[in-house]
Image (cartoon, rainbow, N blue to C red):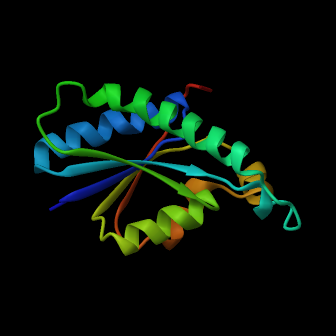
Amino acid sequence: MFKKILVPIDGSNRALLAAKYARILAEKFDSSVTLIHIIQNPAYIMPDTIIPSLLLKDLEVSGKRILDKALEVFDDFDGRVNTLVEYGHPGIRIVDVTEERDYSLIVMGRRGLSDVKGLLLGSVSNHVLHHASCPTLIIKSNDEG
C-alpha cells in the first residue's frame, strides 16, 4: 500500500516523532523510508542575496547531522532507509520531490501554530497537506521541541 514513505526532517522533536510513526508504518507495510532535509536558501527570502559556497557547505553539513540524528530512530530497522538533502522552500520541495520520486505517503510533524498565526505566517505542513498528490499523515505533538 505505502511502498515509499517520505519523512521531512527539520531537527525538531516533532520531526523525530514523525520518523517514529514512519518506522511503524514501514514495518507494517514493508516500505522503504526516505528522510529528507530541506535547506531553505536565504535567497528565497532576499532574492538579490548571493550565498557564499562556504555557507552552503556549512548548511549541508548541518543538514546531514540533523538527518543522522533522525536515522537513530531506524537503528535496528530491517528495511531500507535513505537520506536526502534538498534546497528550496520546504513545502514546495517536499511536494516536488514526492511527485518526482513517486512517494506513496508523507509522514511529517506539525509546528502547531494557532489558526491565526498559521494563516498569517503560512505553514509547511499546511502547504504539503493541500498540494501533495499522495496521502499525508501529519503528526501533532504537544512538545514545543
The image quadrant that residue 73 belongs to is top left
The number of discs equals: 0
Q: Image check: 11 left or right of 49?
A: left
Give me the residue at 32% from left, 33% from top: 20
The image quadrant that residue 92 belongs to is bottom right
Q: Image check: 47 left or right of 4?
A: right
Give me the residue at 35% from left, 69% from top: 134
| Closer-to-camera residue (96/51) | 51
- Residue 69 in the image: state x and y as whole percent: 43, 27
Give me the residue at 54% from left, 33% from top: 11
* Position above or below: 43 against 115: below
- Residue 143 in the image: state x and y as whole percent: 56, 25
| Closer-to-camera residue (14/87) | 87
Q: Image check: 99 left or right of 42?
A: left
- Residue 77 in the image: state x and y as whole percent: 17, 32
| Residue 57 shows up from this direction | yes
* Position above or below: 132 against 37: below
* Position above or below: 36 against 70: below
Position of the C terminus by quadrant: top right
Position of the N terminus by quadrant: bottom left
- Residue 41 in the image: state x and y as whole percent: 70, 56
| Residue 141 shows up from this direction | no
